[in-house]
């Protein structure tokens, strides 16, 4: 068959997964090309905090922290419960430390161990991220490594279909230039790094119907191509009802209010000023609580929590600078600003003080209170829940090879990140542990690139 271009490995998608996959394949001696449908670097990694969990890294040891992959597996399964890709949970936990160290040592990603917070699910500090806490910086560093490696990357070049080899496998992809021109790219291996299907409303209705109509806050390119192509090839699917939501998108600013705010002692109240649930269950699970209650909703905290968080997380600091976290001298002034019932809000804050000081138990079950009880001046931010990204996808094996429904691999086809089955439970948003998305994106990309290179010896 004639091709316009040929590579050992073709990567479709230039987010964190695709860039990591390309780097690993090139390290293994394969010729690699990347195509990205948008005219810029994209993907949910760009809008994340860039936090990657690693269990047993040298950075943890230097900080005096003892961690290991099996402890990480325990944390992950404790939150996710039983699901259809538990073997991936173990695989990704066991490569998490080498992955983080490879990102720093080989890919040149600026990344440090995060000790200011853990986030839901982690019983020890194992998140590693850019000093800015911006996923954009992680992706930019990976892109710089791709450029140094001389790997060609074609932006604004959407893949329109996979090219089959006539024997049940894949041998490349067809791409469009957006002007009617088509290019046929041959490859011995194709890695799908096309993200999930959060922006594909038909697939959301099919697999995650409770989120149909919810605000979508993820990457706009997440349109489910991998699911559609994979199903056409007979690929199996797993954990399709799972997703990551977030309970605190600032309204109307559109910025993310980091969940460090509730973890440090903040609370979430409804239009009356009453709490609605246990904020310590985490930002993804709590989004369902908010969705059930309906808006308007407000994060209530104090200047200590605001200033502590703003000094450590750049994006939240920008929200503060732009007026998204105003302070009031007392509860009555806060209630007046937000249209809350002042007596209800006062009672809520009094309850929080009793609970946080151990004088009472929380009817919602919250036990961790950080810097609480809250003290005036008080701070508030109007928030709303949103869908961030889907966590189900193509079933893959330990090397990220796409599997048919019968468990056999589709020759020449790999998937990672949102294109592949995730490890955040069977359905809903309650199984998501902070960093799961990036662990699957980078981890499966890392594995796919290494295996594809071995399958294509130079």
Image: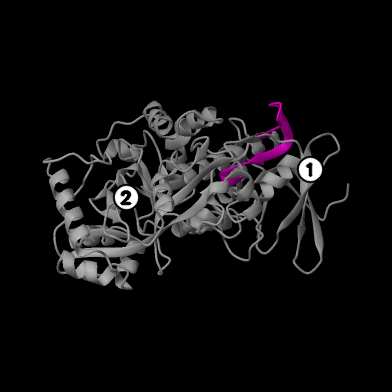
Closest to the observer, 141 or 319: 319
Whether the magenta-drawn stretch holds residue 407 is answered as yes
Residue 401, labelled with which disc? none
Mark 1, secondary structure of its residue: strand
Please report the bounds of the magenta region as a residue range.
Answer: 402-419
| Residue at the (28%, 47%) spot, across then down | 117
Disc 2 element? loop
Closer-to-camera residue (46/325): 325
Up the image or down, 110 lies above or below 95; here it is below
In the rendered structure, find residue 276 and report the number of the disc placed on it.
2
Quick check: is 346 in the magenta stretch?
no
Find the residue positioned furthest to the right. Answer: 1
Which residue corresponds to the image point at 43% horizontal and 47% vertical from the top-left?
288
- Mark 1 and mark 2 in contact (Cβ < 8 Å)? no
Q: Give x and y (percent) for residue 120.
A: 35, 42
Percent across and percent down for residue 316 are 33, 62
Q: Earlier in the sequence, mark 2 or mark 1?
A: 1
Q: Is residue 291 left or right of residue 426?
A: left
Density class for disc 2 (Cα within 10 Å; few <14, some 14-19, many ≥20) is some
Against 128, residue 136 (above or below) is below
**Cα distance between the residues tagged 2 and 1:** 53 Å
Q: Is residue 117 left or right of residue 101?
A: left
Q: Which residue is denoted by mark 1 in the rendering? A: 171
Inspect this view and state whether residue 225 appears.
yes
């Amino acid at each position: 068959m004639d091709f316009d271009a040929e590579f050992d490995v073709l990567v479709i998608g230039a987010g964190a997964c695709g860039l990591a996959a390309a780097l690993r394949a090139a390290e293994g001696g394969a010729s690699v090309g990347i195509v990205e449908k948008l005219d810029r670097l994209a993907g949910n990694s760009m809008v994340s905090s860039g936090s990657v969990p690693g269990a047993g890294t040298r950075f943890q040891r230097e900080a005096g922290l003892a961690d290991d992959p099996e402890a990480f597996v325990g944390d992950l399964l404790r939150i996710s419960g039983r699901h259809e890709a538990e073997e991936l949970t173990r695989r990704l936990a066991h490569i998490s430390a080498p992955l983080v160290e490879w990102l720093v040592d080989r890919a040149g990603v600026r990344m440090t161990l995060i000790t200011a917070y853990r986030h839901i699910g982690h019983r020890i500090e194992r998140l590693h991220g850019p000093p800015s806490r911006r996923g954009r910086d992680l992706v930019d560093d990976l892109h710089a490594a791709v450029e140094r490696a001389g790997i060609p990357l074609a932006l604004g070049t959407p893949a329109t279909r996979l090219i089959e080899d006539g024997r049940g496998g894949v041998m490349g992809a067809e791409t469009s230039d957006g002007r009617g021109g088509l290019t046929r790219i041959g490859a011995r291996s194709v890695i799908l790094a096309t993200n999930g299907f959060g922006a594909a409303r038909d697939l959301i209705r099919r697999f995650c119907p409770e989120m149909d109509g919810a605000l979508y806050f993820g990457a706009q390119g997440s349109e489910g191509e991998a699911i559609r192509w994979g199903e056409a090839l007979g690929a199996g699917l797993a954990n399709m009802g799972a997703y990551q939501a977030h309970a605190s998108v600032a309204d109307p600013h559109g910025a993310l209010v980091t969940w460090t705010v509730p973890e440090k002692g903040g609370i979430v109240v409804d239009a009356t000023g009453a709490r609605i649930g246990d904020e310590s269950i985490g930002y993804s699970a709590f989004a369902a609580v908010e969705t059930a209650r309906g808006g308007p909703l407000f994060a209530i905290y104090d200047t200590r929590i605001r200033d502590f968080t703003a000094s450590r997380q750049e994006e939240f600091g920008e929200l503060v600078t732009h007026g998204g976290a105003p302070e009031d001298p007392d509860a009555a002034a806060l209630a007046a600003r937000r249209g809350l019932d002042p007596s209800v809000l006062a009672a809520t804050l009094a309850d929080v003080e009793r609970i946080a000081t151990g004088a009472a138990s929380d009817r919602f079950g919250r036990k961790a209170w950080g810097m609480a009880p809250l003290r005036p001046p008080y701070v508030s931010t109007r928030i709303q829940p949103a869908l961030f990204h889907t966590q189900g996808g193509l079933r893959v094996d330990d090397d990220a090879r796409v599997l048919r429904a019968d468990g056999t691999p589709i020759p020449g086809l790999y998937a990672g990140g949102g294109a592949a089955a995730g490890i955040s439970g069977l359905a809903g948003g309650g199984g998501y542990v902070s960093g799961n998305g990036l662990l699957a994106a980078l981890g499966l990309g890392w594995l796919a690139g290494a295996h594809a290179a071995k399958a294509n010896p130079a």
